[in-house]
Every structure is written in structure tokens, then in C-alpha cells.
């Protein structure tokens, strides 16, 4: 047989789109390599180093021989630590056990695994919109259909039970919730989240609660689904160490789900990636169990995010025409682009990059093309300079 010369993608990826956020970062990196001084506010990645106590724990784990395969669903102490954390919030009699936890190579992988084992052809999954770009693709890779449910911009784009019901059909199987949200920074209150979870429980929909930004909240602490869920029978909680502990490259995420779902995900993972990196699991274990050190580190990082957020908002508000969602969590600002052309967000992002050397992500990546997402996971002086350029570019829009 002669090797195929042309690549015809399989039906599995026929609709797959490149991640827009990664594409922006790559374009920014390419321009930097050409010598341009780009302020990259495209990435969803903390700009801090992983705290030292975590790095040391990883070094100790290597020296102690943690260099081999582990259990597919993760080392027991880590799964126990995740369950113990969950039980600090969950007050139901069905205590969370390590058997309900599956550790993977990042919350992205956990979300994909959960989609793949729970959704399939013919299923519809409600995706509050704007949402993180990968939800739509993961649902599609599971051969289910993502149904965008656009929230009210005047309410931080948050959705309500009524909105979910209005988009539901007999085929609806699940809902993807994310609070604090990427890309808006919106945070559901306890009452809002409880109402959504009650609606999902009543309808028997699987509800994914992606809580990857839960420790990055301003003012009040963010509510977890485990604080308010009426039941865990239909709940898949997703979290990881990437954002709160500045551990993006270590690749550790997990799910907490009913045990049969956890078992199916473990079986699936056993044939795809096996266990998450053993050293990274030990690093994550330190992040979750060395609580005093972790709290000190997280508090310091969140304080810096808060200062940048406040400074950025103050500059954007010097131009009253700019509409921005006031973020209560995560590290993003969602800003409405000047109304130019068919894809205002893409036009504005392109002008900012090519003319003002600022990289941001067009809102079309999140199915809301009138907006752009600006990350403030960068040094404060850079964030402030970038915001001044955003204001100038906004005022000079054609
Ligand atoms: N969920 C959301 C909402 C995110 O924004 C991201 C990363 O950008 C992830 C999940 C993935 O995180 P991880 O690095 O744990 O895979």
C-alpha cells in the first residue's frame, strides 16, 4: 500500500476548530520573535511561578522514586485529599469518597473524558454562552450537539433556569456551568447556582460544574456546586491546580462524580492516556495538603490579580462608551468592541494586535462576536499600558 499523500480528516474531527485562544498566543509569540514588543493579554495562564513549596515537594517525590506508572485514576493520597476538600463543602450524608475522584492530565482532559462517557450522538448539551471555547468542541467530539444559551450581558451573561428551560428539548442531556467564568469573570451567587442546580436535578440533566477559577474571586468567596447542590446524583465537579496554584504546565485536573461515572472515565482513560504524570500528582498533593503554605501563596496571587483588575477597570472607565462586564472572579475582562463590521470583536482584536501591539482574544471564540476577552494575568504596569491603548484604539475606531 502506498502512503496517502493527502490528508483527509476523519469524521471524528471533521468539524474541529483550532483553539482560538492558543492561536492568539501563537500569533503574539510569532510577532515577538520578529522583535515586536507585544503585550500578550491573550493567554489564560497565571504569570506567576509555581510556589516554591510545591516545586520542592515535586523534587522530593522524584528523589523518593515517584517516577513510575500510578493507578490510572491517580494516587490514593491525592484522591483522598480531593475528597476531603470536597467534604469540607458538601454536607450531604453521602460523603465524597476517593472512588468518586478521577485525576487526569488537566481539567481540560477531565472535561473531555466526562463529555465522552456521558454524551453521544443525538444528545444536546446546553452551554451558557459566552463560555470557554473548548466546551463546544468537546461536546462535538463526543458527537453530541452543543446548544448555546446566551445570557443577558446586563447580568454578566449569567444564565437562569428559565433560559435553560427555554433552550431544552427532549434530547437535552447536560449543562456546562463554569463559575467564576472564563471569559466573563462573572460569578454565580449561591442562590443563582442553587436554582440552576435544582433545575438540572429536576430535569435529570447531567450538570458539569467547572470550578477551575473558584479560588480566584474578589470581594466574596465564590460558591461551589458542592455548597448548594440538592444532590450529587447528576453532578460532575471539575477542578484542577492550574490556575489557583500557578501550575498550568504540571497538568493535573480531576472530576468528582458518581462512582459509576468515575469508573467509566477511568476505563476510558486507561486506554488513552493512563495516569497523569506521577511527579505532578505529588506536586498537586502538596498544593492541596500543605494548606497554610497554599493559602499564603494563593492569597498573595489573588491580591495581585485584584489590584490589576481594579487598575484595568479604572482605566477602561475613563471612556464611558466602553461596556465591560465587571469581573468578580478569574482574571479576564470581557469588553464590548466598537460596532464595526460583521465580526466587531475580531476586527478590534486585529487592530489592537497589529496597530497597538496588544494581544486579546476575539469574542467569536466564545460565540459572542461583539466582544473581546482581555486577560490580566500579566504584570500590572503592562496591563495598565495595554488598557490605555485599548481606550485609545476604542476612541479611534473607524
Ligand atoms: N476550564 C476553563 C474554564 C478554563 O479556562 C481552562 C483553561 O483555560 C481549563 C478548564 C483548563 O485548565 P487545565 O489547565 O486544568 O486543563
Image (cartoon, helix red, strand yellow):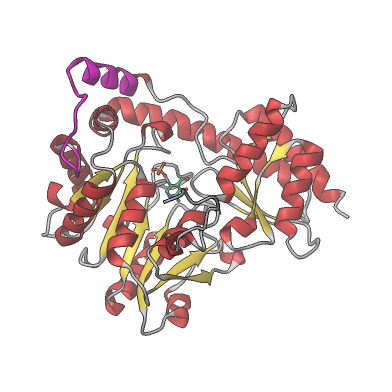
Q: Which residue is drawn at 16% across and 56% down?
A: 263
| Residue lying furthest front | 1
Residue 278 or residue 217, whichever sits in front: 278
Quick check: 155 left or right of 138? right
Quick check: 270 left or right of 316? left
Quadrant of the rendered structure where residue 11 is? bottom left
Quick check: 15 left or right of 289? right
Q: Which residue is drawn at 63% across and 56% down?
A: 363
Q: Residue at x 50, y 37 (%)?
A: 45
Instruction: Point out residue 129 in the picture as x, y percentages from the top left corner.
Output: 53, 64
Whether the magenta-drawn stretch holds residue 328 is answered as no
Residue 360 seen in render? yes
Residue 90 seen in render? no
Q: Which residue is drawn at 25% across and 27% down?
A: 290
Instruction: Point out residue 352 in the picture as x, y percentages from the top left corner.
Output: 76, 43
Q: Is residue 91 above or below residue 173?
A: above
Q: Is residue 332 above or below residue 381?
A: below
Residue 395 or residue 358, whichever sits in front: 358
Instruction: Point out residue 324 in the picture as x, y percentages from the top left corner.
Output: 66, 54
Instruction: Point out residue 106 in the picture as x, y percentages from the top left corner.
Output: 35, 42
Residue 220 or residue 144, whichever sits in front: 144
Whether the magenta-drawn stretch holds residue 69 is answered as yes
Magenta segment range?
53-74
Q: In which quarter of the image is the C terminus?
A: bottom right
Amino acid at each position: 500500500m502506498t502512503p496517502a499523500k493527502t490528508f483527509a480528516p476523519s469524521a471524528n474531527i471533521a468539524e474541529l476548530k483550532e483553539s482560538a485562544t492558543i492561536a492568539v498566543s501563537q500569533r503574539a509569540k510569532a510577532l515577538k520573535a520578529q522583535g515586536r514588543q507585544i503585550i500578550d493579554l491573550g493567554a489564560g495562564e497565571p504569570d506567576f511561578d509555581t510556589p516554591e513549596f510545591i516545586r520542592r515537594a515535586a523534587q522530593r517525590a522524584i528523589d523518593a522514586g515517584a517516577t513510575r506508572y500510578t493507578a490510572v485514576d491517580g494516587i490514593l493520597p491525592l484522591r483522598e485529599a480531593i475528597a476531603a476538600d470536597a467534604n469540607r463543602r458538601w454536607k450531604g450524608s453521602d460523603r465524597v469518597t476517593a472512588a468518586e475522584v478521577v485525576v487526569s492530565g488537566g481539567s481540560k482532559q477531565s472535561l473531555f473524558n466526562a463529555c465522552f462517557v456521558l454524551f453521544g450522538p443525538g444528545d444536546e448539551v446546553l452551554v451558557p454562552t459566552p463560555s470557554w471555547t473548548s466546551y463546544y468542541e468537546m461536546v462535538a467530539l463526543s458527537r453530541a450537539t452543543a446548544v448555546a444559551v446566551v445570557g443577558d450581558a446586563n447580568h454578566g451573561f449569567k444564565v437562569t433556569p428559565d433560559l435553560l428551560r427555554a433552550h431544552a428539548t427532549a434530547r437535552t442531556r447536560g449543562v456546562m456551568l463554569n463559575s467564576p467564568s472564563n471569559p466573563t469573570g462573572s460569578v454565580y451567587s449561591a442562590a443563582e447556582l442553587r436554582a440552576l442546580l435544582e433545575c438540572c436535578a429536576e430535569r435529570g440533566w447531567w450538570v458539569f460544574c467547572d470550578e477551575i477559577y473558584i479560588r480566584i474571586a474578589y470581594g466574596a468567596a465564590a460558591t461551589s456546586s458542592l455548597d448548594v447542590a440538592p444532590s450529587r446524583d447528576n453532578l460532575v465537579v471539575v477542578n484542577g491546580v492550574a490556575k489557583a496554584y500557578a501550575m498550568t504546565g504540571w497538568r493535573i485536573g480531576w472530576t468528582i462524580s458518581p462512582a459509576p461515572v468515575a469508573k467509566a472515565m477511568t476505563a476510558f482513560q486507561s486506554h488513552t492516556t493512563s495516569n497523569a504524570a506521577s511527579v505532578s500528582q505529588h506536586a498537586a498533593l502538596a498544593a492541596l495538603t500543605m494548606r497554610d503554605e497554599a493559602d499564603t501563596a494563593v492569597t498573595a496571587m489573588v491580591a495581585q490579580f485584584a489590584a490589576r483588575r481594579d487598575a484595568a477597570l479604572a482605566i477602561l472607565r475613563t471612556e464611558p462608551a466602553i461596556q465591560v462586564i465587571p469581573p468578580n472572579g478569574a482574571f479576564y475582562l470581557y469588553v464590548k468592541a466598537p460596532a464595526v463590521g460583521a465580526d466587531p470583536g475580531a476586527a478590534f482584536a486585529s487592530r489592537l494586535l497589529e496597530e497597538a501591539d496588544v494581544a486579546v482574544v476575539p469574542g467569536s471564540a466564545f460565540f459572542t462576536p461583539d466582544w473581546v476577552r482581555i486577560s490580566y494575568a500579566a504584570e500590572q504596569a503592562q496591563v495598565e499600558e495595554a488598557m490605555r491603548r485599548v481606550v485609545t484604539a476604542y476612541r479611534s475606531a473607524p
